[in-house]
Image (cartoon, coloured by chain):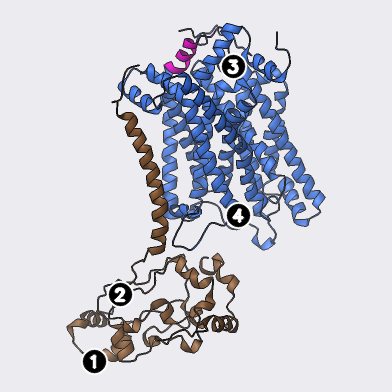
């Protein structure tokens, strides 16, 4: 039989098999680590056309979240305010400030400011703000201390696994409806007992929370 | 060359191997068309048609992914239609290959030897065609890996109580074992090709593929042990894969699906459809490659007997389905049976199915029909159509008229349903034409063993083995 391949072919094949096995092992180790540590851009500020400061407006000036995010209690989307909302104050405050150039041009030509989306939930996930607020999920539970943010960023990874942490055991996170907007809310030491009471009081159907069609239709 | 079948004087034989074969002659008969630099015109014609259909397949998939599953005729309540019919049809076809290669090996049926190689190839290509359908049928095919149990950020795991998850494991196990079994069987033959290869491309291709096979006694001993172990591994798959697919239906509540007979009935149907496809491939192949002394009348006769046997099991299944509908006394089951047989929309499908799968196979009781390639070819085509209709009747006709009048809906396949189906033939055909051009379509190493026995012990190997294992006197 003639030689078609160099003598080190066998060694090469052995190493290739070994390398393939090592790759599979590495993959099996790396995937769980990735799944557990993937942060999905948490804490990374999303650049915006105007450097809007939530801490200035919500904390120092004490404007209610709902002043701008008007539909948060009644609709699926919290809604991003139109320029008209900004102009209720800024027609008087810091008029002509170049930092707000985008707002002035939006006001003049009637085109909304093109804010960049921060929480990009997939189109096949039917998230509803009003349902969560009615069940006693606080703003800060998902969005973090927005009142302390200079810019805006995700406080939580917003992965499905993260959603499921609450959907599987809502009593761990619910708070009284009166505390939903309280950004500084701290869960009491008997959170589980309180949470179970709230689950019953707000008619949270824990079986439905983990069924696919609750969020995916 | 000691090949005689190419001439018009060739006399058909009912032995497993025509008498007077030499090992070298067998190698020449099988390997010459593979190693030859010239490709026959019929190959180019068949390959061109297949590649054209494969183009249609690719176009359909691109259109499907860019537009969505709305291009199909499926709509509630007929959520499973052409894609699932075609999936079950293709996966069923594969089963004959596994039965021939694994079950007949373990049952010591040496007539499997000359048809197992291309039947295994048929299995693998059919599984490829089948396996793509459930993925394409997903709303978002690009996230098909969500079906797998892998660590993820979704906080989710597949639902192991669902037969659809069992399906995934059944098909991936089937594809893997079939591929490994086929390849291990190919290694000695690839080494034969490597040793007589002429061009540099062939030397490299068969050199790499034959994994340094030297033909040493130790190599052979390990090879035959590995081959037997793999046969034992694949044998249960003949029964389990299609049983699992049957459970997709049997576990549901839809009248016409929720039947305990489904698993064995589906397995028989799969082997039935598979042997029809084996005949459809074997009859042209033995002529085109002048292999009539290797794939003999004995093979066609035996395949036809299996076709008849499994066909009658399937017909029994049709009878039991209707009987159980009556015997259950359940209103929805009764209506399903009535609608299947006499319903205004689809009665023709049921009666066409009976004509194809029951009436058309009855001539196979006659030996003269079983040993007539042209007749077998026609019957095999009819059976293939019949088995497609069977899945149409089970899947579509059951779904169109379910529990609530308000949700009744008639199903009409669209152009893209048919395009994807025709395209899957292109995929199968392209792979098969490449296979018969590049790889030996008959397991020559095993055939040579048989020829050696014929030459040195002067008897039909099949009868010899049969008498050895079943204790009867061999044929004179």
Check contact, mark 4 vs mark 3: CB within 8 A. Answer: no
Residue nearer the viewer, A192 or B384 = A192
The structure residue drawn at horizontal position 61% and vertical position 7%, both measured from the top left corner, is B457
Q: Which mark is residue B296?
A: 3
Label 1 or label 3, whichever lies nearer to me, is 3
> Percent position (x, y) of residue A130?
48, 80
Which chain hosts label 2? A
In the picture, which chain is brown? A
Q: Mark 1: which secondary structure?
A: loop
**Disc 2 to disc 1, how far (Cα)?**
21 Å
* Mark 4 to mark 3 CA distance (whole Å): 45 Å
* Residue A123, quarter of the rendered image: bottom left
Q: In the picture shown, does residue A155 fall above or below B428?
A: below
Confirm or deny contact between disc 4 and disc 2 (CB under 8 A).
no
Pinpoint the chain carrying mark 4: B
- Residue displayed at 61% across by 51% down: B163
From the image, tell me which residue sits under label 2: A115
- Residue A93 badge: 1
* Other-residue count near label 2 (Cα within 10 Å), few / some / many at <14 / 14–19 / ≥20: few
């Amino acid at each position: 039989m003639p030689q078609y391949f160099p003598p080190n072919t066998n060694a090469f094949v052995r190493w290739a098999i070994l390398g393939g096995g090592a790759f599979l092992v590495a993959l099996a180790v790396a995937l769980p680590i990735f799944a557990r540590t993937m942060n999905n851009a948490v804490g990374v500020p999303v650049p915006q056309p105007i450097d809007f400061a939530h801490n200035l407006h919500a904390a120092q000036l004490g404007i209610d979240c709902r002043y701008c995010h008007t539909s948060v209690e009644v609709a699926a989307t919290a809604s991003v305010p139109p320029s008209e909302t900004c102009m209720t104050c800024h027609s008087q405050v810091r008029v002509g400030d170049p930092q707000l150039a985008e707002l002035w041009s939006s006001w003049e030509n009637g085109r909304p400011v093109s804010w960049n989306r921060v929480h990009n939930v997939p189109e096949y996930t039917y998230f509803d703000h009003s349902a969560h607020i009615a069940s006693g999920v606080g703003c800060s539970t998902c969005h973090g201390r927005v009142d302390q943010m200079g810019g805006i960023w995700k406080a939580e990874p917003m992965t499905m696994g993260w959603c499921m942490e609450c959907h599987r055991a809502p009593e761990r996170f619910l708070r009284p409806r009166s505390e939903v907007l309280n950004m500084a809310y701290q869960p009491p030491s008997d959170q589980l007992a309180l949470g179970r009471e709230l689950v019953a009081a707000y008619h949270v159907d824990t079986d439905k929370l983990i069924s696919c069609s609750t969020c995916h239709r | 060359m000691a090949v005689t079948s190419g001439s018009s004087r060739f006399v058909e034989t009912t032995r497993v191997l025509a008498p007077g074969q030499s090992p070298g002659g067998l190698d020449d008969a099988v390997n010459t068309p593979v190693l030859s630099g010239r490709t026959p015109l019929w190959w180019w014609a068949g390959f061109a048609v297949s590649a054209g259909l494969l183009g249609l397949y690719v176009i359909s998939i691109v259109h499907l992914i860019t537009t969505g599953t709305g291009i199909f005729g499926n709509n509630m309540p007929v959520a499973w239609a052409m894609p699932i019919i075609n999936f079950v049809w293709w996966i069923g076809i594969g089963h004959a290959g596994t039965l021939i290669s694994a079950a007949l090996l373990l049952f010591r049926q040496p007539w499997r030897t000359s048809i197992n190689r291309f039947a295994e190839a048929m299995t693998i290509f059919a599984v490829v065609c089948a396996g793509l359908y459930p993925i394409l049928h997903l709303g978002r095919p690009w996230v098909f890996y969500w079906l797998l149990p892998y660590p993820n950020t979704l906080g989710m795991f597949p639902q192991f109580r669902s037969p659809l998850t069992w399906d995934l494991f059944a098909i991936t196990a089937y594809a893997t074992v079939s591929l490994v079994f086929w390849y291990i069987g190919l290694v000695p033959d690839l080494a034969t090709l490597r040793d007589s290869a002429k061009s540099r491309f062939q030397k490299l291709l068969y050199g790499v593929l034959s994994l340094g096979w030297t033909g040493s006694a130790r190599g052979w001993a390990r090879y035959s042990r590995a081959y037997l172990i793999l046969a034992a591994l694949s044998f249960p798959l003949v029964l389990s894969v299609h049983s699992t697919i049957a459970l997709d239906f049997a576990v549901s509540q839809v009248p016409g699906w929720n039947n305990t007979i489904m698993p064995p009935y589906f397995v028989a149907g799969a082997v039935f459809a598979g042997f029809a496809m084996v005949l459809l491939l074997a009859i042209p192949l033995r002529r085109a490659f002048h292999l009539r002394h290797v794939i003999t009348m004995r093979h066609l006769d035996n395949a036809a007997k299996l076709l008849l046997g499994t066909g009658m099991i399937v017909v029994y299944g049709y009878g039991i389905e209707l009987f159980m509908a009556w015997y259950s006394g359940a209103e929805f089951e009764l209506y399903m049976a009535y609608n299947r047989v006499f319903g205004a929309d689809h009665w023709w499908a049921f009666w066409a199915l009976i004509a194809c799968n029951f009436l058309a196979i009855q001539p196979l009781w006659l030996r003269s029909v079983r040993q007539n390639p042209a007749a077998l070819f026609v019957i095999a085509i009819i059976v293939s159509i019949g088995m497609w209709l069977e899945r149409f009747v089970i899947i579509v006709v059951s779904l169109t008229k379910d529990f609530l009048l308000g949700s009744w809906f008639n199903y009409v396949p669209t152009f893209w349903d048919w395009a994807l189906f025709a395209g899957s033939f292109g995929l199968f055909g392209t792979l098969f034409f490449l296979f018969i051009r590049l790889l030996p379509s008959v397991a020559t190493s095993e055939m040579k063993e048989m020829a050696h026995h014929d030459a040195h012990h002067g008897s039909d190997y099949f009868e010899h083995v049969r008498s050895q294992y079943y204790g009867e006197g061999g044929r004179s």
